[in-house]
Amino acid sequence: MNPVRRLLPAALAFALSAGSGAAIAQESRLPDIGSSAGSILTPAKQAEYGAMTLAQLRHAGYILDDPLLDGWLRDVGMRLGGASDRPQQPFTFFLLRERQINAFATLGGYIGVNAGLILAAEREDEMAGVLAHEIAHVTQQHVLRGVERAQRDSLPILLATLGAIIAAQQAGGNSSDDATSAALMTGLGLIQQRQINYTRDNEAEADRIGIRSLANAGYNPEGMADFFQTLQSVVRMNQGDERSATPGYLQTHPLTLSRISEARERAQQLRQNGTIGTATVSTPNASRSEPFLRQPDYAGSTSNTPNPLLPASLRLPSHATASGETGDFGWARERLRVLSANTPAQAIREYQQMRAREPLNEVQRYGLALAHHQAGQNADALRELTPLAEAYPGNLWLQIAMAEAEAEAGKTAQADQRLETLLARLPNHRAAVLSYAKLLGERNTREAGVRAVALLRPLLGTGNQDLPFQQVYARANEIAGDPVRAGEAWAEAAYLGGRPEQALVQLNNLKKREDLDYYARSRIDARIAAITPIVLELRRQGIRDEDATGR
């Protein structure tokens, strides 16, 4: 199938999301009062388009699903969302594996963050500043007003252009199709002109409200301005290069000296006015509530550690002010460095280059160990991890990494004991449960499957939109001897992975089983009824999953 046609669902969702970093922004002449934004799409429909965006990005291979990273990003995002001016707004935060510096918001409160943005950040409050900005785009209805503009005159252009952009990214940034290239160039020119005309008011408002949310959540409000300064340094380094060298975030979020100075002035005003919030900081080792309390990312250090992704000339002086960070930023950033690398060998080379400049710190040694584990070099992984895990026995990131490396090295008893101990301390912790259940599923025994199902069952209530959960739950039921539950979970995994037509085929085949009881048949019928309209809409647009239909 033509890759542009296959990715049109994602393009549709992105086009509808127009206001905040993905497509068209609000026209500055539109007044805030009297806008029809909010009446265009119901909240339920907005959530449907947001979920559609996420699913199709997964289908295209852009999403990085990792329980540990997802949990950390969700904790930061929900904390900011709860401190925003619309705490009742639902949000979904997700990671893209791309190393380009970018982030965007779309309908339904779905907010995506590229790996490159987190790798470029020096501290968690810098990354949180970007999230707070994107949250403000949602709460101020910039996205919905972008839909209003898009529905009036721009949707076809965006559909074609965004489909071309995604297709070109799949091909490594180079399109071999002349028509695709033409659509890309034409669409980019039109979109860029609209951004110049329409985004300045939105960006100023998102900065102003975002900084307030950042402070209310207990973060250092200067984090936003600090990250803007980092981006400005990247731009200066890339001057004279092609547009592709400019961080994607700046292509949709124009940056000026006045914007940086205004952000810093707002942060200083918040400090002077004493409007700094108190946020609860939850870590594996502590739960406390203090304003701007910095939890160390690892012993003897804070997240002010110089960022090895940036050359020394671009590293900015860190502020002495402590902030209410989660304490997990360093571990998350190094895990993300490894999982976003093209290959484990590339990640290992990155750490070797860091080590050639200066000794690796604890979180970097953790990252190197993960890279060795990903490369199948478990002895090397355990050599790096063992002293770290002994020094910090309560650290969730290290304990899971140790267990996974031990299991791969054939030390299953040690791995099981480690994870059982971890779950005794953190019952039903999503990342720990999924890691343990996945290891059990790889053993391919009924006993392991039964144990995995027991571990996963308490998470069923929150797993309906959780792709990693559905995949692990499907495998656990499969080897535990429950093909019906396994089939339902595999269908959900297909649906969440952007393959609704495949999910429908799987459910209809499952429905033919003669051993279905009343409850199973009812569940399957309900899912068929929910998924069928989505499949029909995609077909109406001329988009089919040929792998599912065989046509």
Image (spheres, rainbow, N blue to C red):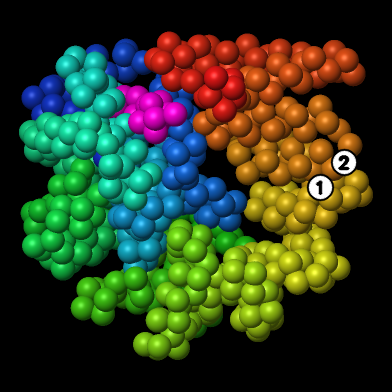
Q: Is residue 286 left or right of residue 60?
A: right
Residue at the spot x=85%, y=42% of the render? Answer: 479
Residue 210 pos. (x, y %): 29, 45
Residue 114 pos. (x, y %): 38, 51
Which residue has dot 2 on it?
A: 480
- Of residue 371 and residue 122, the one placed in the foreground of this image is 371
Residue 422 pos. (x, y %): 74, 62
Label 1 Cα crowd, 10 Å radius (few <14 / some 14-19 / many 20+): many
Marks 1 and 2: CB-CB under 8 Å? yes
Occupied quadrant, residue 150:
top left
Can you say whether 467 is above or below 315 in the image? above
Q: Secondary structure at mark 1?
A: helix
Which residue has dot 1 on it?
A: 452
Residue at the spot x=44%, y=45% of the render? Answer: 62
Q: Quadrant of the N terminus?
A: top left
In magenta stretch: residue 292: no
Say what amino acid the circle numbered 1 marks: Ala
Q: Nearer the viewer, mark 1 or mark 2?
A: 2
Can you say whether 341 is above or below 532 in the image? below
**Disc 1 versus disc 2: distance between alpha carbons?**
9 Å
Residue at the spot x=77%, y=62% of the render? Answer: 419
In magenta stretch: residue 3: yes
Q: Quadrant of the C terminus?
A: top right
Q: Is residue 392 visible?
A: no
Occupied quadrant, residue 263:
bottom left
Q: Is residue 522 visible?
A: yes
Say what amino acid the circle numbered 2 marks: Ala
Q: Is residue 52 left or right of residue 276?
A: right
